[in-house]
Amino acid sequence: MKIIVVKNQEEGGKKAFELIKSGMEKGAKVLGLATGSTPVTLYQEMVSSELDFSDMTSINLDEYVGLSGDDSQSYRYFMNKKLFNKKPFKETFVPNGLADADVECARYDKIIAEHPVDIQILGIGGNAHIGFNEPGTPFDVTTHKVALTEETIEANKRFFDKAEDVPRFAYSMGIKSIMEAKEIILMAYGESKAEAIKATVDGEITEDVPSSILQKHDNVVLIVDEEAAKLIQK
């Protein structure tokens, strides 16, 4: 596990972009992408670059259940606004939040199998969730419907008009699928992520800490600012 400590989120976005550019130069064709505030500076770097993504495929980690792709709070809408409308990709996949759970999870597993992820971008929750794989999620799970924890709902309510508007379920790429990516880049910023980063790097590998499984992946890069990194054992 390689750890890169940066001054701020802007520098973190530049570092992550450099890794993606290098990966593409080496033949990477499929990017696993994340939403939320963490990867925004990365997407800004991608948009402002001269890199051509028209031969690239993207597969997003997750989507809220019950939201259509044109809902302004959906992750499909977020990705279109932040990246896809500005930098066209060959194909972009995001779970369908309106689809039947069993059908959609099987469909998404098939998409991932047909498009193995070269570089997976991750954020991390304060409870160490990756994607929407909350504490207690089995490490061998693939795409599944997740009941979001109150902590995750609380963290996400800032994006909604009121807390009760936050969906209670999501479809998420599973931990097994995430671990199958050839390279993983996890970004984390701020003191609120320090405990999760410490557990990811130094803690016991346990399903109670979903991100701890990354210790078993042989090509993981953590991009963290000084606040998020402050509890890591030097």
Image (cartoon, rainbow, N blue to C red):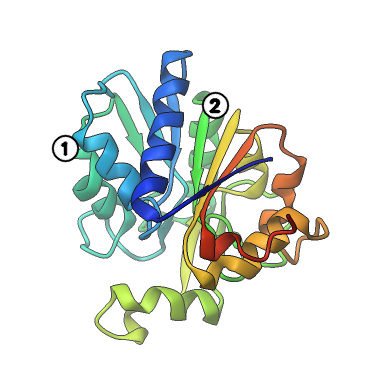
Location of the N terminus by quadrant is top right
* Residue 200 figure quarter: bottom right
Residue 39 point in image, percent of width and height: 38, 50
Judged left or right of residue 19, residue 127 is right
Tell me the CA gap for discs 2 and 1.
24 Å
Is residue 94 visible to us here?
Answer: no
Q: Residue at x 60, y 28 (%)?
A: 182
Q: Nearer the viewer, residue 86 or 137?
A: 86
Outermost residue toward the right in this view: 204
Residue 76 point in image, percent of width and height: 29, 50
CB-based contact (under 8 Å), mark 2 and mark 1: no
Q: Which residue is mark 1?
A: 86
Q: Amino acid at mark 2?
A: Pro
Q: Residue at x 57, y 38 (%)?
A: 184
Residue 47 point in image, percent of width and height: 22, 36
Q: Nearer the viewer, residue 83 or 62?
A: 83
Who comes first in sequence, dot 2 or dot 1? 1
Q: Residue at x 31, y 49 (%)?
A: 41
